Amino acid sequence: MEEKPFLGTKEVAQFLDVNEKMVYTLVSEKGLPATKVTGKWLFPRRLVEQWLEGHIINYPRSAKLPSSQGILVLVGSHDILLERTMALFNRVFPDHLAVFGNVGSMGGLRALSRGLCHAASSHLLQDDMEEYNFDFAALEFGGEMPAVVNFCQREQGLLLGKGNPKAISCVGDLGRPGVRIVNRPAGTGTRSLLDRELTGAGIEAARVEGYDRECRGHLDVGMEVLAGRADAAPAIRAVAGLLGLDFVPIRWERYDLVICRERFFEQGVQFFLGLLNEPAFRHMAAQLEGYDLRLCGKMLYPHQPKPSTEGPAGAAVRRGSQREGAEGT
């Protein structure tokens, strides 16, 4: 028997397993879809089902994205090279579309655990000051680890005005009177790194002028410094190269793509990962400062043999914070 497109009050009460009086309460207080255009309450079955799904808690982690054939959704930490790679992907694969949601590393992992994207970009430094992302992903996924593929290693530090007019040489100088910064939002790996460095320097965030002034992306904070509205900002070296700003290095970091295992072999994901080995991508990365691609495209979890950490990027990742600056850059 074909289902009726509209339910009466008694029928929707049976469908929701509540009494009829509760149905009226759900209409007035919880937004249960209904119409009274015919003089009696009618409930569109399709909208009632959608309303019910929208009130589900403990949403299953294996939930699929809504029908999105040909769309690749990446969410998480902003990166200039990733942004350009997605534009390259859209040119190389015109039957697909890659889109990005800039919500920070933690926001990306949360979105991934809810099934809202194919991959999350993240660079969250763990307490051991060496590894990245594994502990945070395991916590978000309840111990059911997703796959982790490296996208790049990149150099983090402080953007400064050309010529460094405030003579800023380290994070500790941000606590001096008259030094203004612009920050990244809470939940981003860049903000987390700055917080660690401030704590290590014995500086309370409240003492840093502009600490609560936030911009969403690396280029956004760079533009604030370029315009003279801030003296310093935490960001990656690539921004300094693009905008002609000075730069004080803090450390090299690992920037990874975290991918649900159920989605790993989907066509869009595999096309994107394959692009990381193409000359066009490598040439594009070489035009930007502060990137190291020796781990790029490598599967980090499930674990592969541990790669060499010699050289500027690997050594900085191993040593932790490098206030004296990374060698060989």
Image (spheres, rainbow, N blue to C red):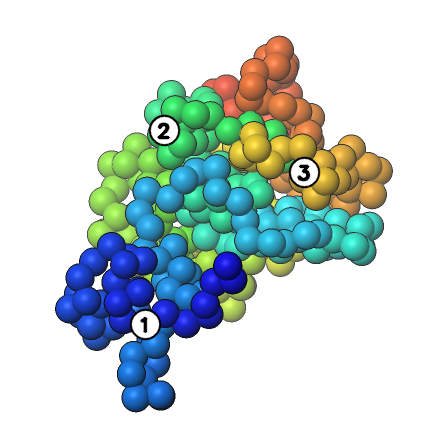
**Separation of residues labelled 2 and 1 (CA atoms):** 42 Å
Based on the displayed image, in which of its 4 quarters is residue 272 positioned? top right
- Specify the amino acid type for callout 1: Gly
Q: Secondary structure at mark 2?
A: loop
SS at mark 1 in the image: loop
The correct choice, above or below, for 39 with respect to 279 in the image is: below
Q: Is residue 148 above or below residue 204?
A: above
Q: Is residue 111 visible?
A: yes
Tell me the tag on residue 142: 2
Task: Kindly identify which numbered label has been placed on residue 8.
Answer: 1
Given residues 302 and 5, the one toward you in this image is 5
Q: Can you give x and y, in whole percent of width and height, for residue 238 in the image? A: 62, 47
Image position of 91 (left or right of 192): right
Q: Nearer the viewer, residue 190 or 117?
A: 117
Q: Residues within 10 Å of mark 1 (few under 14, many from 20)?
A: some
| Of labels 1 and 3, the one closer to you | 1
- Give the residue displayed 30% in from the left and 32% down from the top: 200
Check disc 3 and give the amino acid type. Answer: Glu
**In terms of image quadrants, where is residue 27?**
bottom left
Q: Which mark is residue 266?
A: 3
Question: Looking at the image, which residue sits at the far top?
Answer: 305
Q: Viewed as shown, does residue 92 lie left or right of 151?
A: right
Q: Which mark is residue 115?
A: none
Indicate the quadrant containing the C terminus: top left, top right, bottom left or bottom right: top right
Counting residues from the N terminus, which is met first, the one under dot 2 or under dot 1? 1
Decide if residue 296 is on the left or right side of residue 131.
Answer: right
**Gap in Å between the C-alphas at discs 1 and 3?**
42 Å
Q: Secondary structure at mark 3?
A: loop
Q: Position of residue 314 (x, y in %)?
A: 58, 22
The image position of residue 4, as x and y in percent, is 45, 67
